[in-house]
Image (tube, helix red, strand yellow):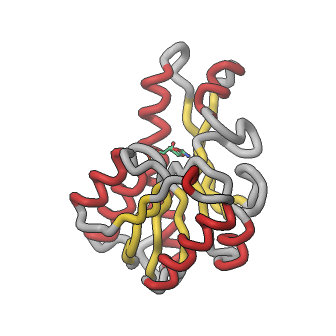
């Protein structure tokens, strides 16, 4: 299955997915990494794995529709079938949604519908919840609102954001891998 990973940051989820592919757990190929942050660390990670990167700067386009049309073109050139969002910090617009209906998934660092949007971990700690978690969901036009595919709980380390974040990232990498195996390799006997 040909996929593209969209990311704006560090790209640890990209790397976890790429490693699952390379070690044979996930039958897929990341054809392209799409980023709106040409200096993000995900670009270095992609280069290290030899995965092509399409980097764009949103502000040099007139509209979301304009840059998404270029993204769709890049995806079609590579025959990409699924879009995997992994820390992509932009709302997906109609151009991409209608080109990939029910074929876009996202991972979010909270138990949705709690704490959607930016800095979900900070929101959860600010609220004082004891349990937060990770959600994998289909993407619709809303902010972190599409149908839920999988969730896992993570205990907050009180007063320690860094440690909480580390737990969440570890769980994210495992949950995204499992979810993608179910979604892209439904007949796989391993899981
Ligand atoms: C993850 O916590 C993801 O859930 C959120 O952004 C973060 C991306 O981390 N949407 P990374 O870039 O994959 O390391």
In this rendering, the answer to whether 152 lies above or below 56 is above
Q: Residue at x 24, y 63 (%)?
A: 49
In this rendering, the answer to whether 15 lies above or below 105 is above
Taking depth in this image into account, of 25 and 98 the one nearest to the observer is: 98
Q: Residue at x 45, y 35 (%)?
A: 167
Residue 51 in the image, given as x and y percentages of width and height: 30, 68
Image position of 81 (left or right of 140): left
Q: Residue at x 56, y 26 (%)?
A: 156
In this rendering, does residue 12 appear at all? no
In this rendering, does residue 35 appear at all? yes
Taking depth in this image into account, of 148 and 14 the one nearest to the observer is: 14
Residue 124 quadrant: top right
Residue 20 in the image, given as x and y percentages of width and height: 34, 65
Residue 142 quadrant: bottom right
Q: Residue at x 34, y 56 (%)?
A: 15
Residue 155 quadrant: top right
- Quarter of the figure with the N terminus: bottom left
Image position of 82 (left or right of 130): left
Looking at the rendered structure, the number of numbered marks drawn on it comes to: 0
Taking depth in this image into account, of 25 and 190 the one nearest to the observer is: 25
Image position of 57 (left or right of 140): left
Residue 104 in the image, given as x and y percentages of width and height: 62, 68
In this rendering, the answer to whether 154 lies above or below 83 is above
Q: Can you name the residue that lies furthest to the top here?
A: 159
In this rendering, the answer to whether 46 lies above or below 126 is below
Residue 61 in the image, given as x and y percentages of width and height: 60, 58
Image position of 89 (left or right of 34): right
């Amino acid at each position: 299955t040909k996929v593209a990973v969209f990311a704006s940051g560090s790209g640890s989820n990209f790397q976890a997915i790429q490693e699952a592919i390379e070690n044979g757990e996930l039958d897929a190929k990341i054809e392209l990494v799409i980023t709106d942050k040409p200096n993000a660390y995900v670009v270095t990670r992609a280069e290290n794995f030899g995965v092509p990167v399409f980097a764009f700067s949103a502000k040099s386009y007139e509209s979301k529709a304009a840059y998404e049309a270029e993204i769709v073109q890049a995806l079609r050139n590579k025959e990409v079938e699924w879009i995997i969002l992994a820390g992509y910090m932009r709302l997906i617009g109609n151009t991409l949604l209608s080109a990939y209906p029910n074929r876009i998934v996202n991972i979010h660092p909270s138990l949705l519908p709690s704490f959607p949007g930016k800095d979900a971990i900070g929101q959860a700690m600010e609220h004082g919840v004891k349990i937060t978690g990770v959600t994998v969901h289909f993407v619709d036009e809303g902010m972190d609102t599409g149908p839920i595919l999988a969730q896992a709980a993570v205990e907050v380390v009180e007063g320690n954001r860094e440690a909480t974040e580390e737990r969440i990232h570890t769980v994210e990498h495992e949950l995204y891998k499992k979810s993608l195996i179910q979604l892209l390799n439904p007949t796989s006997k391993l899981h």
